[in-house]
Image (tube, rainbow, N blue to C red):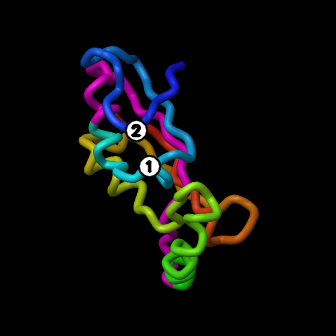
Amino acid sequence: MIALELGQIQAADASFDSIVCTFTLCTIPDAVAALKEMRRVLKPGGRLLFCEHGLAPELPVLRWQNRLTPLWKPLAGGCHLNRDIKALITAGGFQIGELSNRYLKGPRPMTYIYQGWAD
């Protein structure tokens, strides 16, 4: 396991078989750049395994996410409740292989989950 600072991953291209990303894309200031860097160090055929919370599909919940995010960010380490995780992963150069979505127990604006893998 490698802990990372924001910026470039100190590893050669195509170094890793898999990357596990859990509940981090909400707080990374430039999530697309971070995902592109993950893509760079992933071996051909490697997978990004992810479990993230983000933008809900229901309009009432989405509206609450948009309202709460400016208040939530300073309290939760910069966490954005309203990031479209699927769009971020795709913009980072990945193709989604499997994706499931659901709500965890708790307030809906904070608990919509994206879980799956991409290559």
Q: Is residue 20 left or right of residue 91?
A: right
Q: Secondary structure at mark 1?
A: loop
Name the image quarter holding residue 46: top left
Q: Amino acid at mark 2?
A: Leu
Task: Decide whether residue 43 is among the magenta residues.
Answer: yes
Q: CA distance from mark 2 to mark 1?
A: 8 Å
Residue 88 lies in the magenta-colored region: no
- Quarter holding the N terminus is top right
- Residue at 31%, 48% (x, y): give it: 32
Task: Give the crowd class for mark 1: few <14, some 14-19, many >=20 residues within 10 Å.
Answer: some
Q: Residue at x 25, y 18 (%)?
A: 13
- The total of numbered circles placed on residues is 2
Assess disc 2: are there few (<14), some (14-19) or many (≥20) residues with their C-alpha within 10 Å of its C-alpha.
Answer: few
Q: Which residue is mark 2?
A: 6
* Proximity of marks 2 and 1: CB atoms separated by less than 8 Å: yes
Residue type at mark 1 is Ile
Magenta-highlighted residues: 37-59
Mark toward the start of the polypeptide (2 vs 1): 2
Q: Badge 1 is on which residue?
A: 28
The secondary element bearing badge 2 is classed as loop
Q: Is residue 14 left or right of residue 105?
A: left
Question: In the image, residue 93 lies at what x, y percent?
Answer: 24, 41
Extreme-right residue of the structure: 105
Please identify the quadrant where the C terminus is shown.
Answer: top left
Q: Which mark is residue 61?
A: none
**Residue drawn 30% across and 33% down?**
37
Q: Please name whichever residue, 28 or 17, is drawn nearer the observer in this view of the structure.
A: 28
> What x and y, as percent, mark residue 81?
53, 65
Q: Nearer the viewer, mark 2 or mark 1?
A: 2
